[in-house]
Amino acid sequence: MVSFIGAGPGDPELLTIKGKKIIDSADVIIYAGSLVNPQVLDGAKDGAVIYNSATMNLDEVIGVMKDAEAKGLKVARVHTGDPAIYGAHREQMDRLDELGIDYEVIPGVSSFLATAAALKKEYTLPGVSQTVILTRMEGRTPMPPKEKLLDLAQHNATMIIFLSVGMLEEMSEILRQAYRPGTPVAVVYKASWEDQKIVYGDLSNIAQRVKEAGIRKTALTVVGDFLGDEYELSKLYDKTFTTEFRKGVTE
Ligand code: SAH
């Protein structure tokens, strides 16, 4: 059995209890060493064999899983954040299907959620934005034609941009064509890690500020007026509003 585990954004205490139990009892651990905090493996049992997938290709990863399965060993495949977001675990699952190897997926706290926590902000403010777009800039992985950053930006929704902090100058130039110029932006480096850093700015100055802070990778860029202070109060906690669980009062 192979367990794909979302290891969370960095802080080892943000690993789920279920994920930790599987890591601690696994015979073989394959972890994405470029981003997963090695401390999430601290409870691994003596004798567990640990592989860093940063130096392995897909065939090698699958080879390790196949060998372990043949020996009846338990495999923990540890991905950063949640594997469903830029985790490249689909291609592994498909190969396991072909091989008839059983697997499960344990979700994790994605870095975009740890980023909101670090910022102490809510992505979905009434009257500001009720939509969150998770995306990236085009790098070696091309963007599908209808998902160009400029097209997505037209919505002025809350936007969270992965894998792209190295292209911040180009990114903010594109975003300025769709968001109003003073739209706030924050860049969160290593959310939830001990060396977490936050840089605030707007679409015209964020690239320079992030450069000055020396941030080049492992960061998310979040854009939108949710970072500001103007919004409407929610209906959910409005005292005059009746919900399924609570009767509203008339003022
Ligand atoms: N599956 C992961 C994302 C993997 S893609 C998740 O759910 O978070 C890798 C990108 O995620 C990085 O380039 C960076 O943009 C972002 N990232 C991962 N961990 C991060 C963290 N702790 N803080 C900020 N950004 C992070």
Image (cartoon, rainbow, N blue to C red):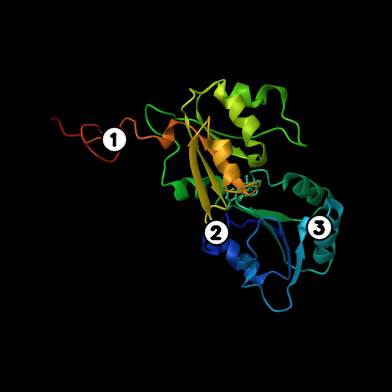
Q: Position of residue 94 (x, y in %)?
A: 78, 46
**Mark 2 and mark 1: Cα distance apart in space:** 42 Å
Which residue occupies 81% across, 48% down?
A: 95
Q: The residue under label 1 is which amino acid type?
A: Thr
Task: Specify whether 43 is left or right of 55.
Answer: left
Residue neighbourhood size for the residue with mark 1, other residues' Cα within 10 Å, grouped as few (<14), some (14–19), many (≥20)? few
Identify the disc placed on residue 131: none
Say whether disc 2 or disc 3 marks the residue closer to the N-terminus.
3
The kind of residue on which mark 2 rests is Asp
Element assignment for label 2: loop
> Is there a contact, CB below 8 Å, between mark 2 and mark 1?
no
Residue named by callout 1? 243
CA–CA distance between discs 1 and 3?
Answer: 53 Å
Dividing the picture into quarters, in which one does residue 8 lie?
Answer: bottom right
Ligand 1 near label 3 (Cβ, under 8 Å)? no
- Find residue 200 and report its horizontal and vertical position in percent: 48, 41
Amino acid on which disc 3 is placed? Thr
Quarter of image, res 28? bottom right
- Which mark is on residue 55? 3
Helix, strand or loop for disc 3: helix
Disc 2 to disc 3, C-alpha distance: 25 Å
Q: Which numbered disc flags the more N-terminal residue, 1 or 3?
A: 3
Who is closer to the viewer here, 209 or 247?
A: 209
13 over 114 or under it: above or below: below
Residue annotated with mark 2? 195
Camera-side residue: 204 or 41? Answer: 204
Task: Name the residue: 55% across, 21% down.
Answer: 178
Query: In the rendered view, would you say 250 is above or below 217?
Result: above
Q: Is residue 150 above or below residue 237?
A: above
